[in-house]
Amino acid sequence: DQQVKQNSPSLSVQEGRISILNCDYTNSMFDYFLWYKKYPAEGPTFLISISSIKDKNEDGRFTVFLNKSAKHLSLHIVPSQPGDSAVYFCAARPSTGHYGGSQGNLIFGKGTKLSVKP
Amino acid sequence: ETGVTQTPRHLVMGMTNKKSLKCEQHLGHNAMYWYKQSAKKPLELMFVYNFKEQTENNSVPSRFSPECPNSSHLFLHLHTLQPEDSALYLCASSQVDRVTDTQYFGPGTRLTVL
């Protein structure tokens, strides 16, 4: 059973418009959330993160919103650029000790492929 | 060299071969990870090493054997693999004693098992 879900496998957006990537999670014990971007033949690159004590974090064109009551987070990219075309992964970290595992384990969604058209 | 590096970038091996994947991190982190990414699946965590001690082994078959000789190097030894083990193998590192311990990934090794 997937704990982190990205229900849209792909998204196509026009250059200059807003891209909104969504992620849902099932476990209220996650305390830290991250977005990664992945180009073909490369490893995921960290993009932006948010702690569960916040509801918004902004970094340039990228903003992550967290709605804890809905167990939902989203990544907004505005304005979108063709170079943003990549697969975007949402990841969540269980709070320390909840699963008896080591701190730092991340659980990833399947990813959403974003295509930004010129 | 900066960040997380992985070698080789591509590997083709037969089912009877023995090979090793290497990962090196230049970030001063104290934890390293092996992930597997198969087509249309989420990244699957395989192994975690904190302070060189293995702390996680997510039911990975014994034909995958990790080794962490120091906090900067991580190996994945492969033997008698199956074609379904073909995937992208990613290494990552992080500093786990920070509240916001972000994992940084290497470029991956694309493995094909014939």
Image (cartoon, coloured by chain):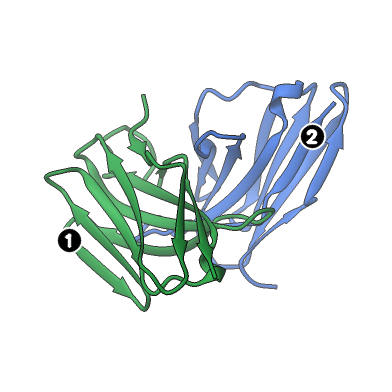
Report the amino acid beneath label 2: Thr
In this view, the residue in front, A76 or B56, is A76
Report the amino acid beneath label 1: Asp
The residue shown at (54%, 66%) is B28
Image: A62 above or below A66: below
The residue shown at (51%, 66%) is A84
- The shade of chain B is blue
Q: Position of residue A111 (x, y in %)?
A: 47, 45
Q: Which mark is residue B3?
A: none
Q: Quadrant of residue A98?
A: top left
> Quick one: quadrant of the N terminus of chain A?
top left
**SS for callout 2:** strand
How many numbered discs, if any?
A: 2
Extreme residue in the bottom direction = A60
> In which chain is the residue bearing label 1?
A
Quick check: can you spot residue B99? no
Left or right: residue A95 versus residue B104 is left
The residue shown at (72%, 31%) is B86
In this view, the residue in front, B6 or A12, is A12
Question: Which residue is disc 1 drawn over?
Answer: A55
- Which chain does green denote in the image? A
Q: Position of residue A93 (x, y in %)?
A: 33, 46
Left or right: residue B6 versus residue A29 is right
Question: Which residue is disc 2 drawn over?
Answer: B112
Give the spatial CA distance, label 2 vs label 1: 42 Å
Image: B112 above or below B7: above
How many neighbours does mark 2 have within 10 angstroms: few (below 14), some (14-19), or many (20 or more)? Answer: some
> In which chain is the residue bearing label 2?
B
Q: Position of residue A60 (x, y in %)?
A: 36, 78
